[in-house]
Amino acid sequence: MATRQKSAPAKPRVEVKSEGKARGKHNGTIEPAKGKLGVMIPGMGAVATTFVAGVEAIRKGLAKPIGSLTQMGTVRLGKRTEGRSPKIKEFLPLAGLDDLVFTGWDIFEDNMYEAASNAGVLDSRLLEQLKPFLSSVTPRAAVFDHNYVKKIDGPNVKKGKTKMDLAEQLRADIRDFKKTSGASRLITMWCASTESYIEATAAHQSLKSFEKALIENDEMIAPSMIYAYASLMEGVPFANGAPNLTVDLPVMLELSRQNDAPICGKDFKTGQTLMKTVLAPAFKARLLGLSGWYSTNILGNRDGEVLDDPGSFKTKEESKLGVLEHILQPGLYPELYGNIFHKVRINYYPPRGDNKEGWDNIDIFGWLGYPMQIKVDFLCRDSILAAPIVLDLVLFLDLAKRCSELRGRGIQEWLSFYFKSPMTVPGLYPEHDLFIQLMKLKNTLRHLRGEELITHLGLEYYD
Ligand SMILES: NC(=O)c1ccc[n+]([C@@H]2O[C@H](COP(=O)([O-])OP(=O)(O)OC[C@H]3O[C@@H](n4cnc5c(N)ncnc54)[C@H](O)[C@@H]3O)[C@@H](O)[C@H]2O)c1
C-alpha cells in the first residue's frame, strides 16, 4: 500500500477556535487538519486513477488542480465593497494535498499505474513520471457479486461464508491501512462500477435488520452497502460517486449519525447532467416552456461497458431523469413544464474510450407558444471532469468529520453541488440547480466561520 512522505514542510494551518473573532461567533468548533488523511477507494478504475495520478502530478508541480473548488475557488465575505474574497482552502482548515495517502480495492489485480494505463485517460508521458508512486498503490481484494455488475468479473475477490464475514474483512483492511499508512483520519470514496438497480427493502430500514440480513446473506445487500457499513462502523465518512443506493438508506443514516461519520451522494455530476442543471434553471428563470429533452451519449470505457447491462443502466437512468422534474417544478408551472418528453440513452461505443460524446436536443417554446430548439454537443472527458469532484469531496467530507456543527448530521446536503442525484433526509426534495447548490455550499462555509450569509439583497448599497 502506498504511503507518502511529506516532500515539503507542513504549511501553517488556519487556527479555528470556538469563539468568533471580529465577524461574529463561529458555529461550532473545527479540529485542525493534523497528520495524514487516508483516502480509501473501492474501484480503482478510470476515475480513481485519474484522481490519484492528478493529485501526485499537482504535488510534483507538473499540473494545476483545474476544476477543483477547494484548490482554486474563492468565497466572498461581507459586502461587495469590502473586497474580501479569500481562497476557500485559506478560509477553512482543509487537509493539504501533501497529506493525502491512498489505498483501494478492486476485482482486478492491477496497481494504479497499470490501471491508469489501461483506462487510457492520461497520456503515457505523464504516467511515466508518476510511475513509482502509482505502482505502489495496489488493490486490496474486493467484496464483489457478479449479480450486481453483470458485465465484468475478476480474480481479486474476498471469500467469506456470510456478508457479515466480508464486512469484518473490510473493517480489518481499514484498520490495517490506518496503521500502516500512519493516517490520522480516513475517508471512503466509492468509485467502483454502477450496480444493478434495486429498491430498499425491510432489511435496509434499521441497523438491527441490516445486520441480521448480513448474517443471513440477504441477496438485497449489495457489495457497495457492505463497504459503506464497514466504513461507517469504523467511524469513517463515506461518499458515493455512483448512482447505487449504497448510503441512501435509513440504516446508513442511522449509522452515520450514531458514529459521527458523514455521508453524501450520489452519482458525480460531471458532463451531460452538469449542462442540464445549468440550462434548465435558465429556462425556468425566463419562463420558457419545455416540450422535450432527448439526451444520448456514446462512450467506450469500462463504465460504458458496465452500463450496457440493463440493470446497471436503470440505476443510472433513474439518477439522470430526476433532475428536470425537480428543477422545473411542473406542479407549479403546468403550462410550461406539465408535458415534457425526457429521454436519456447511453450507448457503449468502444472506439471513443473515456472521451464521451453527449448530445442533447432540447425543444423549448417561448412567447405565444412559438417553438425553438437548442442542440448541445459536449465532447467531454469523463474522468477529467470527475477527478476534481473526487478531490473536493475527500477534503470537504474530512472537514465535515472534524466539524462539531456537521459531523453528527448524517447526510451532508451542502455537497449536493457535486451530485446528479443529491441525497436529502426523507421527505425533503433535493436542490438540483447548480447555482443554488453552489450558494448552499458557500453559505455553509460562511456559516461555519460565523460570517454573514450572502442573500444578494443589496439594498444597503443604496441607502
Ligand atoms: N466519470 C464520470 O464522469 C462519472 C460520473 C458519474 C458517475 N461515475 C461513476 O463512477 C464510477 C467509476 O467510473 P469509472 O469510469 O472509473 O469506471 P471504471 O469501470 O473505470 O472503474 C470502476 C472499477 O470498479 C471496479 N469494481 C467493480 N465492482 C467493484 C467492487 N465491488 N469492489 C471493488 N471494485 C469494484 C471495477 O473492476 C473497475 O476497475 C462508476 O460507477 C460510474 O458510473 C462516473
Image: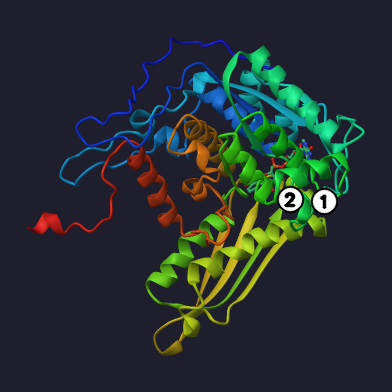
Q: Quadrant of the C terminus?
A: bottom left
Disc 1 target residue? 220
Q: Position of residue 10 (x, y in %)?
A: 43, 13
- Disc 1 crowd, CA 10 A, few/some/many (<14, 14-19, 20+): some
Describe residue 52's horizontal placement relative to residue 221 as left or right.
left
Residue found 52% across the figure and 35% down from its top: 397
Ligand 1 picture quarter: top right
Q: Under tag 1, what secondary structure?
A: loop
Residue located farthest toward the right when viewing the structure as drawn: 161
Q: Position of residue 383 (x, y in %)?
A: 62, 41
Disc 2 target residue? 204
Amino acid of disc 2: His
* Residues marked 2 and 1 touching at CB (< 8 Å): yes
Amino acid of disc 1: Met
Q: Quadrant of residue 123?
A: top right
Distance CA(mark 2)–CA(mark 1): 9 Å
Q: Position of residue 235 (x, y in %)?
A: 62, 30
Q: Is residue 191 above or below residue 296?
A: above
Residue found 34% across the figure and 33% down from its top: 87
- Disc 2 crowd, CA 10 A, few/some/many (<14, 14-19, 20+): many
Residue located farthest toward the bottom when viewing the structure as drawn: 368
Q: Which badge, 2 or 1, is on the more N-terminal residue?
A: 2
Disc 2 under 8 Å from ligand 1? The reply is no
Question: Which numbered circle lies on residue 22?
Answer: none
